[in-house]
Image (spheres, rainbow, N blue to C red):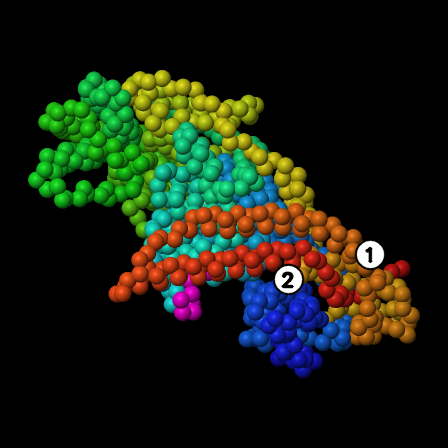
């Protein structure tokens, strides 16, 4: 039931200034509507966090005990309690607890206060990227080792940005398989809601909004997969209005010369802040590396990429890794298959063209499957035979479309090589492939047998990785009798992935069979510490991704990695040397140059392994950590936030939203009482930049109790004016630096958008005015964008003008003895 003293007050919205009124103070800085003030809206109490005025409409961002909301005045009616009403008397212990809570919760310009409520550890290296972005850096690359919490680092920035601007628009571009994990992390750790976007959900958002309003224009956190975003008709519906933040997870996957890169680059060039996340920034391909470092870059001299690249040792989280190389003695039938494959490769290379790149790619497909399992090799040989049979009928059916592969696990980026010409006559190649397939079908697979023996010796939970789905199915058939299994592969739906993961994490299954679809983003450190890699990936960074599922923050035991290596020239010599060298170099403690070594590309490994070409040593990685200077500030912020969390722990009740001051002084003695006064520093837009808590001594006599002082509305400004003026001068210097970067970013985004826009010529027609309408629509969009840029620049300009809101007495403590 509402307090009568509060509900009898006039509505705040009734006293708001009309549209176009030059006097903003009457509606934005009045005693009832300012940051930190208490408002009653929809019969609930709220604390005002931010106020903005546009075209006569006041947007009020408020915080409650368990949620944040935004209201529009005068459409919602807000009531302010009487600032002169009677104070509340409490015990000293409770008043001190509230004092600790006020000190902990006060806002600060350079402090990410949103992290106080986050369910995370305050690790300095994780805080550094958020501090750099809030200070004005536009493009960040977080390239930490696997398992160091890149998702958490991006979520920190999202949470603080949403806290500071309730109308922020955030776009998270993540792989489809990680969307649920991102939504869970943001909701569970930061209490942030997200909107996952696909074809059906976007149509629902459009129906729920106003007519002709784009859902992408609404504030919020939008979660979208890159494969949905890259579609031309989806990109065309996204307005050109800049995003406040764009995050691209697993950014190395969008660095090919593909539609994925074009879509992410377009979104990056529309972003006021861009964060790229990847544990594998350089895979040995210089072209992909260049596309990564230039992703979203604007034609501006100051749009440099700020890189954060930390190892397990840098973060102080290395528990040590034990790597066991299992050199397998092959069965006679298994060895016969590999011998025949080497003979087939020799024939193809003799007949190949001088360059031989197409033939090497074709042979590399066979070799990788053969070094996985016999089942994977047999399935790939069958697919190549089907291609050869289809090639013979192409002349009769030129219109027939080539069949698409059915599983993403069995078709990597090199799968198109199965269409290549080997150089052998078709009949001759078919005889070779049929012979290899017969041998593979009857061979006793040494890898599968060894894995079964490993699991029979222990009940330790284990994650078994293989690159191909056919290999996973072969393992599943052989291991189903000795362990309870869960399987994850690319042919499953997101719900099936979640079910398999839940079974393993809960302990109902002790073995997780997975392809590399599970090699990104999954957190298995609490369920297992042992990883078995059935096949050795030719890109060593994939191996780091696999072991990174258990070697993550929260792992308390030493991680074990088991690698299976065949005792055969097809694999033993070069590939094991490459992997040993890269693994040793990347985990070197002494030589930082080796720790940043670039692994060889898969193409280079294939050429060396099959054609015998020399494998040149890797040069030092040019991607250096340029964010080291932010670590000092991050350590200081971590210490401050940790102390504030300790202070917050003194208040054990729900978050206090009290509209009147508390008094803990003795009724008979009021001299020399201590007053705690909160002072909000606002910019010209009405946003709270910082909050000061000023202790003041009350020098009244016994005849003037603090209660009467609070109700009389006496001006306390002279008592704290000197301290406030000094802080404002300091804040003006800080805000000027940030605003200068943001103004440059806004102008660069507008210039890039104008450059990219092209006006297609059209001819007037008596029967069709589509061209003319398209031209007019484009011109209206251009005018709207110019108006948005002008409004944004005006907002940044007004953010530089700082002022002081009316002070509020929070606490009166008993006399100081």
Which one is in front in this view, the residue at disc 1 or the one at disc 2? 2
Q: Residue at x 21, y 21 (%)?
A: 352
Q: Is residue 49 magenta?
A: no
| 420 left or right, relative to 227 | left
Figure check: 28 above or below 122: below
Kindly indicate the quadrant of the structure image that contains residue 201.
Answer: bottom left
Q: Position of residue 621 (x, y in %)?
A: 49, 27
Q: Which residue is mark 2?
A: 685
Q: Residue at x 49, y 24 (%)?
A: 620
Q: Is residue 213 magenta?
A: yes
Taking depth in this image into account, of 248 and 703 the one nearest to the observer is: 248
Q: Residue at x 35, y 20 (%)?
A: 574
Q: Secondary structure at mark 2?
A: loop
Sequence-earlier tag: 1 or 2: 2
Quarter of the picture holding the C terminus: bottom right
Q: Residue at x 45, y 38 (%)?
A: 292
Q: Write down the region rendered in magenta.
A: 209-217
Q: Is residue 537 visible?
A: yes
Q: Position of residue 227 (x, y in %)?
A: 35, 48
Distance from disc 1 to disc 2, alpha carbons, whole Å, reads 24 Å
| Disc sitting over residue 91 in the figure | none
Taking depth in this image into account, of 535 and 365 the one nearest to the observer is: 365
Q: Which residue is mark 1?
A: 722
């Amino acid at each position: 039931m509402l307090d009568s003293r509060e509900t009898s007050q006039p509505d705040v919205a009734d006293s708001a200034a009309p549209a176009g009124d030059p006097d903003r103070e009457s509606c934005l800085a009045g005693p009832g509507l300012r940051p930190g003030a208490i408002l009653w809206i929809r019969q609930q109490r709220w604390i005002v966090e931010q106020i903005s005025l546009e075209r006569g409409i006041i947007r009020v961002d408020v915080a409650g005990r368990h949620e944040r909301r935004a209201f529009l005045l005068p459409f919602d009616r807000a009531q302010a309690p009487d600032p002169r009403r009677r104070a509340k008397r409490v015990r000293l212990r409770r008043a001190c607890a509230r004092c600790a809570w006020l000190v902990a919760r006060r806002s600060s310009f350079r402090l990410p206060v949103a992290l106080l409520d986050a369910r995370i550890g305050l690790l300095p290296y994780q805080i550094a990227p958020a501090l750099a972005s809030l200070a004005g850096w536009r493009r960040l690359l977080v390239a930490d080792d696997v398992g160091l919490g890149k998702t958490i680092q991006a979520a920190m920035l999202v949470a603080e940005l949403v806290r500071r601007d309730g109308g922020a628009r955030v776009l998270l571009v993540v792989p489809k398989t990680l969307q649920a994990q991102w939504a869970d992390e943001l909701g569970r750790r930061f209490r942030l809601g997200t909107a996952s976007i696909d074809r059906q959900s976007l149509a629902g958002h459009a129906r729920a909004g106003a007519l002709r309003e784009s859902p992408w224009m609404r504030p919020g956190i939008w979660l979208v997969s890159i494969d949905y975003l890259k579609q031309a008709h989806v990109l065309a519906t996204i307005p050109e209005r800049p995003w406040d933040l764009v995050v691209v997870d697993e950014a190395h996957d969008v660095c090919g010369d593909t539609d994925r890169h074009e879509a992410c680059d377009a979104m990056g060039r529309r972003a006021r802040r861009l964060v790229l996340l990847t544990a594998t920034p350089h895979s040995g391909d210089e072209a992909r590396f260049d596309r990564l470092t230039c992703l979203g870059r604007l034609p501006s001299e100051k749009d440099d990429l700020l890189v954060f690249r930390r190892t397990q040792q840098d973060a102080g989280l290395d528990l040590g890794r034990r790597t066991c190389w299992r050199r397998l003695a092959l069965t006679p039938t298994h060895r016969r298959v590999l011998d025949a494959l080497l003979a087939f490769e020799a024939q193809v290379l003799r007949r190949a063209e001088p360059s031989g790149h197409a033939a090497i790619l074709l042979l590399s497909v066979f070799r990788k499957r053969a070094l996985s399992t016999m089942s994977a090799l047999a399935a790939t040989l069958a697919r190549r035979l089907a291609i050869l049979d289809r090639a013979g009928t192409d002349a009769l059916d030129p219109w027939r479309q080539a069949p698409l592969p059915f599983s993403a696990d069995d078709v990597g980026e090199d799968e198109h090589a199965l269409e290549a010409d080997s150089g052998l006559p078709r009949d001759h190649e078919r005889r070779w492939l049929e012979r290899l397939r017969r041998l593979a079908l009857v061979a006793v697979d040494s890898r599968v047998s060894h894995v079964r023996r490993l699991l029979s010796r222990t009940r330790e939970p284990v994650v078994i990785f293989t690159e191909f789905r056919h290999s996973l199915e072969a393992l599943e058939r052989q291991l189903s009798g000795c362990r309870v299994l869960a399987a994850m592969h690319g042919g499953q739906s997101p719900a099936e992935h979640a079910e398999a993961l839940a079974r393993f994490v809960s302990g109902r299954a002790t073995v997780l069979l997975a392809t590399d679809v599970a090699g990104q983003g999954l957190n298995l450190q609490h369920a297992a510490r042992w990883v078995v890699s059935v096949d050795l990936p030719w890109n060593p960074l994939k191996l780091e991704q696999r072991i990174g599922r258990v070697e993550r923050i929260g792992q308390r035991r030493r991680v074990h990695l088991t690698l299976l290596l065949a005792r055969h020239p097809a694999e033993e010599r070069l590939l094991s040397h490459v992997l040993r060298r890269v693994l040793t170099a990347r985990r070197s403690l002494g030589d930082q140059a080796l720790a940043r070594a670039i692994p060889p590309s898969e193409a280079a490994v294939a050429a060396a392994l099959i054609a015998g070409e020399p494998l040149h040593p890797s040069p030092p990685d040019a991607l250096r950590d340029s964010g080291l200077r932010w670590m000092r500030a991050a350590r200081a912020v971590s210490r401050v936030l940790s102390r504030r969390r300790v202070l917050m722990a003194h208040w054990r009740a729900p978050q206090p939203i009290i509209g009147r001051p508390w008094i803990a002084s003795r009724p008979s003695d009021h001299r020399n009482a201590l007053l705690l006064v909160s002072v909000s520093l606002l910019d010209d837009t009405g946003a709270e930049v910082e909050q000061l808590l000023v202790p003041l001594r009350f020098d009244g006599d016994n005849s003037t109790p603090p209660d009467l002082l609070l109700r009389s509305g006496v001006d306390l400004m002279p008592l704290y004016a000197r301290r406030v003026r000094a802080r404002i001068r300091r804040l003006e210097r800080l805000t000027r630096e940030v605003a200068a970067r943001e103004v440059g970013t806004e102008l660069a985004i507008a210039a890039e958008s104008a450059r990219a826009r092209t006006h297609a010529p059209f001819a007037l027609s008596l029967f069709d005015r589509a061209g003319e309408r398209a031209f007019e629509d484009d011109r209206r969009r251009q005018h709207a964008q110019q108006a948005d840029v002008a409004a944004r620049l005006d907002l940044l300009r007004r953010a530089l003008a700082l002022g002081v809101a009316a002070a509020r007495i929070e606490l009166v403590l008993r006399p100081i003895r």
